[in-house]
Image: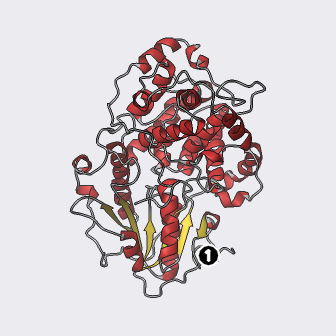
């Protein structure tokens, strides 16, 4: 199908490669506003979704209405996820108002239900601009709205520094991706927030908005019908201020030794810890890379960080856009599917219950140390994730069960779960470079030991402490839930 052309205001924008039309509708001439619907890109500055909305609004002579809503019934809704999202949304609203934009929010709950709110807001819009996310709720809902609405819908990438569209097709691996991606980076570093030319929208709304800036967010979250057994992460406070603090920590404490400490899980200054803020769009890659470029750190450390943030993260985003469902087991290469299937019937003497896996109470001390980071902090050091994921193949009844368990633990517990990067990491765990040797359970999929952590100075003691740290006792399902996005239309 030929992609519909972009309208005036967007087609000549320098960031036009970020934008794609999701339907072929004609703009509504009597629209009240351009609706900017955000789901994950929760920042008001350097946000291409907002900037595209303003550009389109200026061209049409209409104000922009920014909308963000949160429901109770998305998969794994919990205190941890809701509080992080709402903290980011509150700051989004404040900073939108500072930019001269109307921002309205809705938290769905008993006594305050609003069915079909995006469609109702869209019915009064000349067009809808939303974010182009390749996974989880945002992807499915964007497609649904584009089909059902009567107005044009435009999707804008806000997650990547380099828009995936400029890289083209026919990229078979990360090396080929880097050859196209690296020369493009400098050209996409410039940023200038688009200035709205229309007054702030003050017209009618089809609902009563929530005033998050004057709200007790903790009290609000406590009254919702969500998982209250999974608490907020103390390690990752919500909001723009916390994200800015974490970015300053990166440039002053982490980056000066990044190349040598990045893979050391025992070092508190080894990793940036930015992934939750990137996942929910509180920070964008352009802002992070600008801070890195200005930091007082050696070039080898800056190169290593760029490889992680851009070389790996954006490679996983690029991959996800070509997949029907990036969270599906059959995304891994055919050779890995074949070898794991051939060994699916192998004895598995190290099987663990879901209860033990969820709470990090297995017979494997190192695995428990990994899992308890997920459970307590809502985040796991990347060097531990490979061991954690590969060991699940031996601790669950089948490779499919291992994949489902990895995705469940990641999506429920981690603030950077449900993301192209974390799904890409899980896929790498199940299909790292094929080994020359066949092993039980794994076949030709390479295994991973814990020596890289244990051999560190104090590594044994660190693992022992990490494996015994207190963690919340969360509710445990009878079996790993089936992902609603893989079995049909989700009820959200």
Q: Is residue 490 left or right of residue 302?
A: left
Position in image of residue 130 (x %, y %): 49, 66
Instruction: Evaluate whether residue 193 shows in this view.
Output: no
Question: With 278 as the anchor, is 18 left or right in this view?
Answer: right
Q: Which is nearer the eye, 315 or 101?
A: 315
- Where residue 109 appears, x then y in whole percent? 26, 58
The image quadrant where one finds the C terminus is: bottom left
| Visual colour scheme | secondary structure
Q: Position of residue 49 (x, y in %)?
A: 51, 64
Give 77 or 482, whichever is nearer the viewer: 482
Q: Quadrant of the N terminus?
A: bottom right
In the image: residue 4, left or right of residue 228? right
Q: Is residue 107 above or below residue 238?
A: below
Crowd band around label 1 with a 10 angstrom C-alpha radius: few (<14), some (14–19), many (20+): some
Q: Nearer the viewer, residue 347 or 108?
A: 347
Report x, y in % for residue 418: 50, 47
**Image height check: is 287 above or below 256?**
below
- Identify the residue at image location x=74%, y=50%: 183
- Image position of 27 with respect to 231: above or below: below
State left or right for residue 352 relative to residue 293: left
Q: Residue at x 39, y 42 (%)?
A: 242
**Label total for image:** 1
What residue is pinned by disc 1? 6
Q: Secondary structure at mark 1?
A: loop
The answer to whether residue 441 is visible is yes
Residue lying at 40% horizontally and 70% vertically, measured from the top left: 118
């Amino acid at each position: 199908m030929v992609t519909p052309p972009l309208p005036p205001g967007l087609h000549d924008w320098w960031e036009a490669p970020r934008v794609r039309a999701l339907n072929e509708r004609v703009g509504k001439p009597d629209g009240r506003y351009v609706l900017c619907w955000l789901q994950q890109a929760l920042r008001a500055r350097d946000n291409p979704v907002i900037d595209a909305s303003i550009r389109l609004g200026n061209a049409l002579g209409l104000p922009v209405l920014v909308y963000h809503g949160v429901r109770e019934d998305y998969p794994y809704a919990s205190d941890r996820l809701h509080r992080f999202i709402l903290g980011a949304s509150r700051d989004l609203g404040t900073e939108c108002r500072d930019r001269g934009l109307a921002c309205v929010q809705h938290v769905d709950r008993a006594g305050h239900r609003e069915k079909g709110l995006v469609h109702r807001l869209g019915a009064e819009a000349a067009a809808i601009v939303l974010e182009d996310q390749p996974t989880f709720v945002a992807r499915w809902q964007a497609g649904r709205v584009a089909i059902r609405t009567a107005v044009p819908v435009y999707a804008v990438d806000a997650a990547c520094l380099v828009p995936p569209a400029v890289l083209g097709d026919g990229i078979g691996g990360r090396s080929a991706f880097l050859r196209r991606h690296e020369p493009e980076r400098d050209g996409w570093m410039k940023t200038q927030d688009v200035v709205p030319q229309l007054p702030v929208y003050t017209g009618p709304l089809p609902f009563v908005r929530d005033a998050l800036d004057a709200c007790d967010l903790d009290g609000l979250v406590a009254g919702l019908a969500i998982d209250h057994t999974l608490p907020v992460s103390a390690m990752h406070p919500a909001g723009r201020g916390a994200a800015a603090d974490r970015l300053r920590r990166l440039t002053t404490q982490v980056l000066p030794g990044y190349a040598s400490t990045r893979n050391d899980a025992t070092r508190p200054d080894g990793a940036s810890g930015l992934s939750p803020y990137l996942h929910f769009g509180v920070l964008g890659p352009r802002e992070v890379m600008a801070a890195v470029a200005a930091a007082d750190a050696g070039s080898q450390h800056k190169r290593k960080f760029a490889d992680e943030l851009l070389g790996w993260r954006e490679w996983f985003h690029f991959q996800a856009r070509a997949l029907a469902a990036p969270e599906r087991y059959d995304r891994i290469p055919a050779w890995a599917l074949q070898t794991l299937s051939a060994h699916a019937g192998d004895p598995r003497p190290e099987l663990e219950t879901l209860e033990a896996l969820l709470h990090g109470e297995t017979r494997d001390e190192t695995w428990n140390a990994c899992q308890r980071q997920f459970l307590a902090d809502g985040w796991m050091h990347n060097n531990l994730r490979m061991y954690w994921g590969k060991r699940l193949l031996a601790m669950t009844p089948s490779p499919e069960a291992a994949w489902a368990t990895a995705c469940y633990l990641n999506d429920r517990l981690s603030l950077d779960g449900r993301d192209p990067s974390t799904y890409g990491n899980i896929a790498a765990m199940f299909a790292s470079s094929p080994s020359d040797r066949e092993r039980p359970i794994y076949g030709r999929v390479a295994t991973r030991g814990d020596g890289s952590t244990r051999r560190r100075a104090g590594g044994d003691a660190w693992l022992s402490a990490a494996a015994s740290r207190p963690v919340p006792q969360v509710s445990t399902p009878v079996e790993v839930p089936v992902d609603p996005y893989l079995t049909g239309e989700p009820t959200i």
